[in-house]
C-alpha cells in the first residue's frame, strides 16, 4: 500500500538551530511531493512542492527540500529556525494519475524554544 | 487569491441533528475535496469532486453526504453523526485533478458531536 513516513514525530529546537525533517514514501511511479505547515489554530498552508526538474526546491519562509529519487525521500530543511516556526509539519505525496488523492505522513510537531 | 472559505468555523450538534458544512472557492478550480482531521493526526481524504461530479468516495459512512451544486461550492451534509465523528473537517480545491496540481486548504470547520 502507498504510504508516507515521517520519522520525527516531535522535534524540539532552540532558535537559530538548523532543522531537517525526514520524509520517505513508498510508491514506485512518478509522484508529486509537498510539505504543508499547520501553525497553531491556523489552516494547512503550502510550504513548498516538487513536481519535476531541479530536485532542490525552495519554499516560503526560508524552507527548502531535496527530492532524492533513489531513496524515495523528500526531506525538509531550514538553516536557522525561529520561534515562529513552531507548528505541525506534514509531508504529502500525490501518486501520478488523475485521482487527486493526496497521502499525508503522520506529521512532525516542531517546537522552537526562544 | 488562493483562498478557500469554510462555514461555519465551529459546529456543535446532537446525534439526531441534520447540519451542513459549506465550502467555497472563487479561483476557478474544478476539483474540490473533503478531508477529516482528528487532533494531532494528518488529514484523511473523504471525497473528491471533479467538474461537479463525485470522483472518489473513500468508503465514507452514508451519514456524510457530499454535494457539489456548482463549480465554486461544495457542501457536506451531516445526519445522525456519532461522537467519534467529532473532528476538523477541511475543504480543499485544486485547478484540476491532474498531476502537477496543488491543493489549497480552507481553515476548516471544527465539529463536535454530542
Image: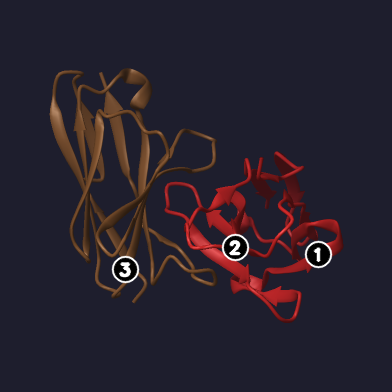
Chain letter corresponding to the colour brown: B
Residue furthest toward the bottom? A53
Q: Which mark is residue A96?
A: 2
User: Which element type, helix, strand or loop, lies under badge 2?
Assistant: loop
The CA span between labels 2 and 1 is 15 Å
- Residues tagged 2 and 1 counted as in contact (Cβ below 8 A): no
Query: For the residues tagged 2 and 1, is the chain the same?
Result: yes
Side of A59 where A43 appears, left or right: left
Q: Which residue is mark 1?
A: A69
> Which structural element holds mark 1?
helix
For the question of whether residue A8 can be seen, the reply is yes
Q: Do marks 3 and 2 share a subunit?
A: no
Q: Crowding at label 1, few (<14), some or many (≥20) Cα neighbours within 10 Å?
A: few
Residue to which mark 3 is pinned: B30
Examine the rendered structure and indicate whether residue A81 appears above or below residue A101: below
Give the residue drawn at x 76%, y 75%.
A56
- Tag 1 or tag 2, which sits nearer the N-term? 1
User: What residue do we see at 49% from left, 68% from top?
Assistant: B102
Looking at the colours in the rendered structure, which chain would you say is drawn in red? A
Question: Percent x, y for residue B79?
Answer: 18, 27
Q: Residue at x 76, y 62 (%)?
A: A16
| Number of numbered labels in the structure image | 3
Along the viewing direction, whichever of A48 and A93 lies nearer the viewer: A93
Amino acid at each position: 500500500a502507498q504510504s508516507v513516513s515521517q520519522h520525527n514525530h516531535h522535534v524540539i529546537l532552540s532558535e537559530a538551530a538548523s532543522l531537517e525533517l525526514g520524509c520517505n514514501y513508498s510508491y514506485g511511479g512518478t509522484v508529486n511531493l509537498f510539505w504543508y505547515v499547520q501553525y497553531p489554530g491556523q489552516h494547512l498552508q503550502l510550504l513548498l512542492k516538487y513536481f519535476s526538474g531541479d530536485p532542490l526546491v525552495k519554499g516560503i519562509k526560508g524552507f527548502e527540500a531535496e527530492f532524492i529519487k533513489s531513496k524515495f525521500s523528500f526531506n525538509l530543511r531550514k538553516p536557522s529556525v525561529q520561534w515562529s516556526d513552531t507548528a505541525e509539519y506534514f509531508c504529502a505525496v500525490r501518486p501520478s494519475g488523475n485521482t487527486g488523492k493526496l497521502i499525508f505522513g503522520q506529521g512532525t510537531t516542531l517546537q522552537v524554544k526562544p | 487569491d488562493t483562498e478557500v472559505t469554510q462555514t461555519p468555523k465551529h459546529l456543535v450538534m446532537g446525534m439526531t441533528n441534520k447540519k451542513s458544512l459549506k465550502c467555497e472557492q472563487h479561483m476557478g478550480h474544478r476539483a474540490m475535496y473533503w478531508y477529516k482531521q482528528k487532533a494531532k493526526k494528518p488529514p484523511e481524504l473523504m471525497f473528491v469532486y471533479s467538474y461537479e461530479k463525485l470522483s472518489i468516495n473513500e468508503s465514507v459512512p452514508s451519514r456524510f453526504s457530499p454535494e457539489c451544486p456548482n463549480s465554486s461550492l461544495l457542501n457536506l451534509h451531516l445526519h445522525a453523526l456519532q461522537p467519534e465523528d467529532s473532528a476538523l473537517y477541511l475543504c480543499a480545491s485544486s485547478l484540476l485533478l491532474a498531476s502537477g496540481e496543488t491543493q489549497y486548504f480552507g481553515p476548516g470547520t471544527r465539529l463536535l458531536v454530542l
